[in-house]
Structures are given as structure tokens and as C-alpha cells.
Amino acid sequence: MTEVREKTLRLWREGTKRLLSRVRRNPKFRRGLVLAFFLLAFTGVFSSYFFSQRVTLQVGQIAPETITASRQVLDPVVMDGLKNKAAAKVAPVYVNNPDALPYAKSLLQQCFTGMLAMRFKSGLTAGEVVQRACNIVVPQSVGANILNESAGQFSVDMKEANTALTVVMQTPIRPGDSLVLARDEVGPQLFSQGVTGDDAVFLNALVGWLVQPNQILDANATKQRQDAAMAKVPPHYLLKGQMIVQKGTKVTSDDLKRLAALGRTSGVNLTTFVGGILFTLVFFATVWLYFKRFQREALANDGFLVMLGLISLLTFLLAVLLNGISPYLVPLAASTMLLTILADGRLAILFAFLYLLGIALTLGVPVQALIPLASGALAGTFAVSKVAQRVDLMRAGLYVAGGSVLGVLSSFFLQGPFPLNAGFWQALAWSGVNGVVSSVITIGCLPFLESFFGILTPIKLLELSNPNQPLLRELMLKAPGSYHHSLVVANLAEAAAEAVGADPLLTRVGAYYHDIGKMKRPYFFIDNQFGGKNPHDKISPALSTLIVTSHVKDGLQMAKEHRLHAKIADFIAEHHGTTLVRYFFSRAEELREKGKKLGLTREDDFRYDGPKPKSVEAAIVMLADSVEAAVRSIKEPMPGHVEGTVHRILQERLHDGQLNESKLTLKELDTVARVFTHVLMGVGHQRIEYPPLSSTGTNGESAAKGYGERLS
């Protein structure tokens, strides 16, 4: 027995290792496993009725236990009764039958034709002839007198019958009492026409039988009116905790109807299970179509898709737990706020719609509660669309609470007279609490999701822009000139990014970190030499180029050590692209012309390794970096000089192919040039020299001859 157990464990371990190895090596297999997991998980959530506890009871059976409602659902017994009453009050809809009178006249014609044909037939009495021809019964004497009339009198009788039939059937006639009243009008009508004697008896019987309803029931229109009346019946719910069956009492058919509505009846509810599968497929298909149409690149981001799945699954699980307290407490807004911050607002609104459908399906949450959940979720989405710091998430909770409360007011107003009952006040209270709960969940989950899935949110960007961040503080201390340069570049790049519709915050933060590699050898960069000796004067241009270009690799290494986000590291790698280190290349050319022996003289040996900027933001930082350095070298930064330098630098980068891989257009490049010029003119505005002060000023200041101050 021990050997079998050990062999089983060994096989299980080996199988697990093979599975994990395949998961690591095969992305498609890994994605398939993740998809299968979420399909099963969501199917389980959406078909939760299928897994609910069931009971086996029959009408007349004594209940072995007390059963209460596990959740709020519509009361089928009360609703059926109210709907039946509403339908019964609807008057049936009748429409005219244009064939009724012509058909009756054709029967009248057949009656007289038949009597004429059979009145002299032997073997039949007068009463039998009338009955066979006209389908009516009259006294034998009346029948004999009618049959003995001349052909002319027959024609007169038929005309009188036709007139009476036409007059009586001109009025609306319906089945029932209306038909009885119409037939009673035949006798008086014949009398008004002067018909008397046996003719009156015969025609009264004949026309009375021929009079039929000329209006018929419109079943479809009647049903539509009944359905409309039933739809107006206000909802009546079985409340959570309400007793359905009491222990020791007989089970009634109404009890079974209520248990069925709660999903507690016996038997396998395959319909619910299939419905859960179908809704899961609808959920996944809707998301897939959205990404395929609007964000195709997201379909290749496995981590992002897993994050969406986890947020969605967590949303439904929390909905199941908190719905037990109150449906107004379901934290739908927390999910939409997370999705807005981690993805975008459009995606959050789409998922909010899908979440509402799923919650209504899974928990049976009434529309009365769905309206506050929807309004709160939308309020939360808009509140965090431009969140600046984590404290703003608490403020967003107030917006969620306000939106939810407005939703409660609207849903209760829609029901008719404003009900100031306990249910209303409870709904208001729980909706207010929902805002707080949503904020707490968002604040608690956001750091983990940011870190685990490597998502760079606006909040994280603001944290990275804090000067007290280790890398920025170290840059300020070790390379203060480069730090100041990065600040100016950040201002330039942010203004340009905002002007062309790029991400200004990402651009600013990327500019802050783009030169952190200069910390390793700060004095080899002119930013940090402060008028001292230039170490490049003692080394070859090739070595200088190697040192200067290595600040990119050094920066990437520092970014890796400090776990800087990949999007920020891209600014470090791409902010020079494959540009030429022109100064040292020119020096090398001069030395070569003078006959000095140099190991490297090719232009490609004096270029950065790249890559070229792949985003608009990185391209703008490259241009701002180059422009700031060039303009700073101008001795007299007059407006024309600044503008000319900006345009020259941008044209050089464009013609050198450094912008080929970014999405920056020529029109946007022109906008960037204008913004750069405007900002740089503000930074390098003209200065004036104040006149010299006397040796003892009014406040005892020392003389400061020739001292100029910048105008503020």
C-alpha cells in the first residue's frame, strides 16, 4: 500500500513538473489554461442558481424544516395574482367583420331557393321543408301557409327579410348579450315594415337565426393590452430572510412556486446552467470584439487580460458576499474606478454595463437597486478620470456616494408617490456607505495591481515625479547640472506633449529620469563641470564618445536596479536614438586631417546605439533634450536666434531619421517647435542691469556696482 502511494505521488510530481514546464515554454498553452480557468470561474458565478441548496417537497407534505428566502426575488404568487387581476380588467378588443352581413344574406337566399325547390316534394311536411331549407323550426300551419304562397309573395317575403336583416346588422353586434339584444330587434323591425300574420312569425324566426355577430375578438390586440396592464403591476418581492415554509406545516402549491423562484426546488436546473454558460460566452465575446475593434494591441498583452479577468471575478465575488447585507452595497464603482485608472474610462463603462447584467443575472438584484449601482459606477469613473494623487480616491468615494444616492431617489420616484418608509432610508444609507467601501477597495487593490501587472498609472507617475525619489535625489546630489537640465527638459517636453495631445505627465516623468546615467561619471558632462577643467581634453575623441554614450547603458542599469517601470526606462534608452556625437566626431576629423593616428574614424562609431524613439512622448523628450542644450549654448538668446536654433535642431533630427519610428507627424512637429520657442523665450528672457547703489543705501546695503538681477 505504501509503494502504491509513493508511486502515485511520484507520478503526480512528474506530471506537475511537465505541466509547469509546458506552461513556461508554450505561451499559447499558457493562454489556453488561463482562458479555461476564467471560463469555468465565470460560468460557476453566472450559474450560481445551479449550485444552490435544493429541497425535495410535495404539495400536502409536512415541512421537515423552516425555509426562508436566501435572497430577494420577485414573489411569483403575489405577482401572478396581481397580473391576473390586471389582465381581467382589460376590455377585450373587437374589430369589424365585413363578411358577416354578406354571409347572412347568402344564407337567406339559400333558404328561399330551397323552399321553392322542395315545397311540392312528396313525403315531406311543410315544417320539414322549412327546417331543411332554412334550418329553423316553425309551426306546421305557419310553414304550410308560407309554402302555399305564390312566387311573387315569396319574392316580397325575401325582400322584407333582407331589409330587416340589413337594418338590424348595421349596428355593432358582439357575442353574448349584444347578440341577444340584436335578435330581439327583429320583430319590431318587421312590424315597422308592415309585416304581419304568418309572414311575421316565419320571418322573425328566419331573420333572428340569420343575425350573427358582425364584430370579432382581436386576440392579439387584447393580449397586448393585457400584457401592458400586467407590466404596470408594481413589483412585490420576497425579502431576504422572509419565511417561505414553516416547519410542521403543510406544503402548498404557492410554497413550491416561491421555492422555485429561489432556485430551491428539487431536480437539476439545466436551463440555469446553460444560461450561465451562454452569458459567460456573451461576456467574453463582447470584450473580445471591443478589443479587436478599438484596442487590438491589448489582445496580445496576457498580463493585462489576466488583470481584467481578476478584477471582474473579484467584482462578482464581492457582489455575492455584500449582496447578503444589501444589494445597494455591491461595490460596482470600485471596479470601474480601478479599470479607469489602470486602463481607460471607455473600457470601464463597457465593463460596468456587463457587470450590471451579470449581477442582475446572478443575484437577482432588482432594477430598483441596479439604477443606484449604475449611477454610482459612472460617477466613480468620471471622478478618477484625471486623478492626481491617492487622496483623490477618497474624494472620488464622495462622488460615488452622491451618484448612488441620486440613483436611489430616481428609482423610488419612478415607482410613484414618494415612499418615506424604512426601505427608502436603508437604501440611502447603504448607497452612501457604498461610496466609502468602493474607495477603500480601490485604494487597497490599486498598489498591488500596479506592482504585480506592471501598470504605470497617473498616481504612480506622480509618485515617481517626487524629488525625494531615491534616483532623483541622487541625481540632484551627484549631478546637479544634469538634474537642472532634466527639469528644464521636463518643462519643455510636458508643454509640447500637451499641445499635440500626447501624455504630458508621462512625458514629464520620462524627462526627469532620462539622464540618470550621468550620475556614474558626472564630470565628463559639461552640465556638471561648472567652469572647471574638461577631462575630455586629455583623452581621445573615441574614448570620449564611449564615455558619453555609455550614460544610456548606465541609466538603464540603474533603472533595472531600482525597478523603474519599462515605460520610463524607454525614455532613457531612446532619448538620443542613434544620433551622432557631433562634437567628438568633428574633433576626430580634425585630428585625422592633422595626421594623428586614430583607431575610430567612421561616423557610425560616433553614434549612440539607439533604439530610436518609438512613441510620441519619447520623441518629444529627445527633441527637448537637444534643443535645451543647443539654446543654452547661445551667448545672446535673442528671439530670432532661439527660434532659428529650435527649427534647426528639429530639422536635423527629422532628416537624420530619428523620428521615423515614432508617430509624430509633421504638423505636430511644427506645433512642438512653436511651443519650444515660446517656453525657451520665457526661460531666457532679457535681463536689465540696475544702476549702481550708493555705498550706504537706505537700508545699509553694500554697493553692488554692475550687479544685474533677473526681472521676475
Image (cartoon, helix red, strand yellow):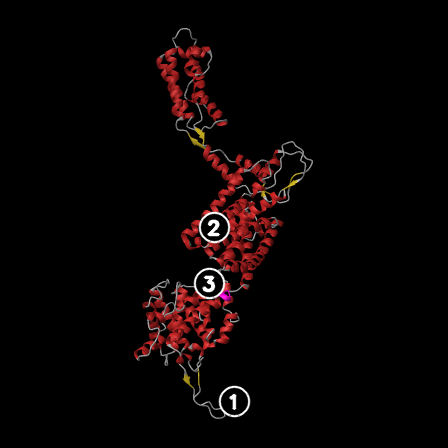
In the depicted view, which residue is nearer to us: 646 or 238?
A: 646
Farthest bottom residue in view: 695
The amino acid sitting under disc 2 is Arg
Nearest to the observer: residue 696 or residue 582: 582
Label 1, on which residue? Answer: 699
Q: Where residue 4 appears, x then y in whole percent?
A: 60, 43
**Amino acid type, label 1:** Asn
Q: Residue furthest right?
A: 248
Rendered image quadrant of residue 259:
top right
> Disc 1 and disc 2: Cα gap in Å?
77 Å
User: Is the residue marked by circle 3 packed among few (<14), some (14-19), or many (20+) residues within 10 Å?
Assistant: some
Of the two numbered discs 1 and 2 in the rendering, the one whose residue sits closer to the viewer: 2
* Callout 3 secondary element: helix
Q: Assess whether residue 523 is covered by the magenta stretch.
A: no
Q: Which residues are magenta?
A: 560-567
The residue lying toward the viewer, choosing from 519 and 68, is 519
Q: Where's the C terminus, which quadrant?
A: bottom left
Q: Residues within 10 Å of mark 2 (few under 14, many from 20)?
A: some
Q: Is residue 365 visible?
A: no
Q: Are marks 1 and 3 in contact (CB under 8 Å)?
A: no
309 relative position to 492: left or right: right
2 or 3: tag closer to the N-terminus: 2
Residue 253's x, y, as percent? 61, 33
Q: Decide: is 636 above or below 257.
A: below
Residue hosting label 3: 566
